[in-house]
Image: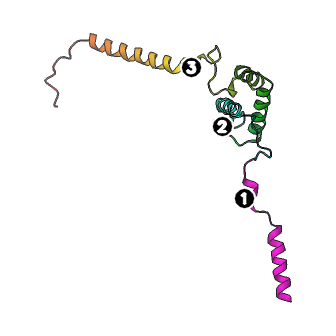
Amino acid sequence: MRTFVLALLWTVLFAAIPLPSAHAQAAQDPTPLEFVDPVEEKRFRGLIAELRCVMCQNQSLADSNAQIAHDLRREVLVLMRRGLGDAEIRQHLVDRYGEFVLYRPRVGAATFVLWFGPALLLLGGGVVVWRIVRSRSRDGVVPHDDTQEW
């Protein structure tokens, strides 16, 4: 009888201890999104792949498992069902979160350096190298020095 009571107490004790992995799980969407047809789902998947999670580091809405990504995916679907086009949905999210929400930001004054900075840097470096090579070639041939040992 004593063994049975001890086994019962150990069972109750282990059942009451929460598993650490249960706390480490990412947020799960309690109600998965349901689509009217495959066309809507394809459009939705394409749109959320182009939008960035506003909380995560370099993850799209499609890839992120953060709670805000779940909420934004749901909001995108609601906007789609209201009849907004893809550009209008992007603009709505840009108005709310800024250009950061777009994986491919638009070309503008604020993003000019982002789009053309690497090309300008490469062009500037090429000009510097060309000027150095040209100035050295103007000096002519280096005179032969018999005093050098090598």
User: Could you tell me residue 22's position as x and y percent?
Assistant: 75, 57
Determine the CA span between mark 3 and mark 2. 20 Å
Which disc number belongs to residue 21?
Answer: 1
Numbered label attached to residue 57: 2
Q: Position of residue 105 (x, y in %)?
A: 63, 22
Residue 78 is left or right of residue 113, and the answer is right
Residue closest to the eye, 114 or 22: 22
Q: Residue at x 69, y 38 (%)?
A: 56
Tell me the magenta residue range: 1-26
Q: Which mark is residue 2?
A: none
**Residue drawn at (73%, 42%), measured in percent from left and top?**
66
Tell me the amino acid under the disc marked 2.
Answer: Gln
The image shows residue 150 at horizontal and vertical percentages of: 17, 31
State the SS at label 1: helix
The residues bearing labels 3 and 1 have C-alpha atoms spaced at a distance of 43 Å
User: Within 10 Å of the Cα at label 2, are there few (<14), some (14-19), or many (20+) other Cα atoms?
Assistant: few
Tell me how many marks there are.
Answer: 3
Q: In front: mark 2 or mark 1?
A: 1
The answer to which of marks 3 and 2 sits earlier in the sequence is 2
Assess whether residue 3 is covered by the magenta stretch.
yes
Q: Residue 115 at what x, y percent from top left?
A: 56, 19
